[in-house]
Image (cartoon, grey):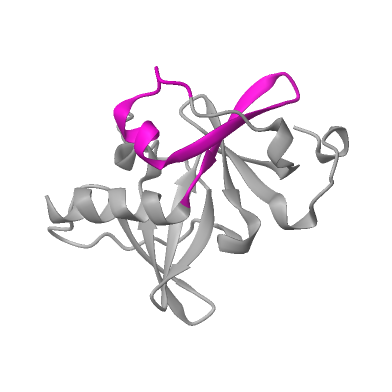
């Protein structure tokens, strides 16, 4: 996906894009702490579904989440190497993704409501969609995503 093809009108509306289970999704840049490699993950015995394990990222403990499982897809492949770092309540989480994309520049006029035929778990977290480079990008609300994580972990 090329960021050059997307016109920027409102700098505040940038999104980090990633591919997951064949779908492109985007998180607001303002919510992304960093993007990093998933390496040296330590599994946590008896951890709830959706948690791959923990890792040390420059002295901080990061909880690696299986974003595929959280969103109702087959569990993460073992060769996942990238994660999107999100900080919530002073804790750092890494959302495992299949592939990182580019930065999507968006304006409200280019966005459409989320399609009604989305999977239930996606409908709960997607605020809208936008076409970019010939494919549909799902715009994700980070707070709603972490509500889904907490529901899965506490189940």
* Magenta stretch encompasses residue 98: no
Q: Nearer the viewer, residue 91 or 8?
A: 8
Q: Quadrant of the N terminus?
A: top right
Residue 154, quarter of picture: bottom left
Image coordinates of residue 47 in percent, x first then y, are: 18, 58
* Residue 4 x, y percent position in the rendering: 88, 38
Q: Position of residue 125 (x, y in %)?
A: 40, 42
Can you say whether 41 is above or below 79 in the image? below
Q: Residue at x 52, y 61 (%)?
A: 85
> Residue 61, percent across and down?
40, 75
Compared with 129, 17 (above or below) is: below
Number of numbered discs overlaid on the protein picture: 0
Q: Is residue 122 left or right of residue 7?
A: left
- Kindly tell me whether residue 74 is visible in this rendering: no
Position of residue 8 in the picture relative to residue 126 (left or right) = right
- The residue sitting at 27% across, 59% down in the picture is 43
Task: Between residue 93 and residue 132, name the one nearer to us.
Answer: 132
Residue at the extreme bottom of the image, as rendered: 59
| In the image, residue 66 above or below residue 38 | above
Q: Residue at x 63, y 42 (%)?
A: 17
Q: Is residue 59 visible?
A: yes
The part of the chain drawn in magenta is 115-141
Nearer-the-camera pick, 89 or 55? 89
Tell me if 131 is positioned left or right of 116 in this view: right
Looking at the image, residue 132 lies above or below residue 102: above
């Amino acid at each position: 996906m090329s960021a050059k093809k997307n016109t920027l009108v409102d700098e505040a509306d940038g999104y980090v894009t990633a591919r997951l289970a064949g779908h492109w999704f985007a998180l607001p840049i303002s919510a992304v702490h960093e993007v990093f490699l998933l390496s040296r993950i330590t599994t946590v015995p008896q951890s709830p579904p959706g948690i791959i394990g923990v890792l040390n990222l420059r002295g901080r403990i990061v909880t690696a989440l299986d974003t595929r499982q959280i969103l109702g897809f087959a569990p993460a492949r073992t060769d996942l190497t990238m994660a999107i770092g999100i900080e919530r309540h002073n804790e750092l989480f890494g959302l495992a993704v299949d592939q990182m994309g580019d930065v999507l520049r968006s304006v409200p006029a280019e966005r459409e409501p989320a399609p009604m035929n989305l999977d239930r778990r996606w409908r709960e977290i997607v605020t809208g969609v936008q076409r970019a480079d010939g494919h549909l990008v799902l715009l994700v609300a980070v707070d709603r995503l972490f509500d889904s994580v907490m529901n899965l972990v506490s189940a």
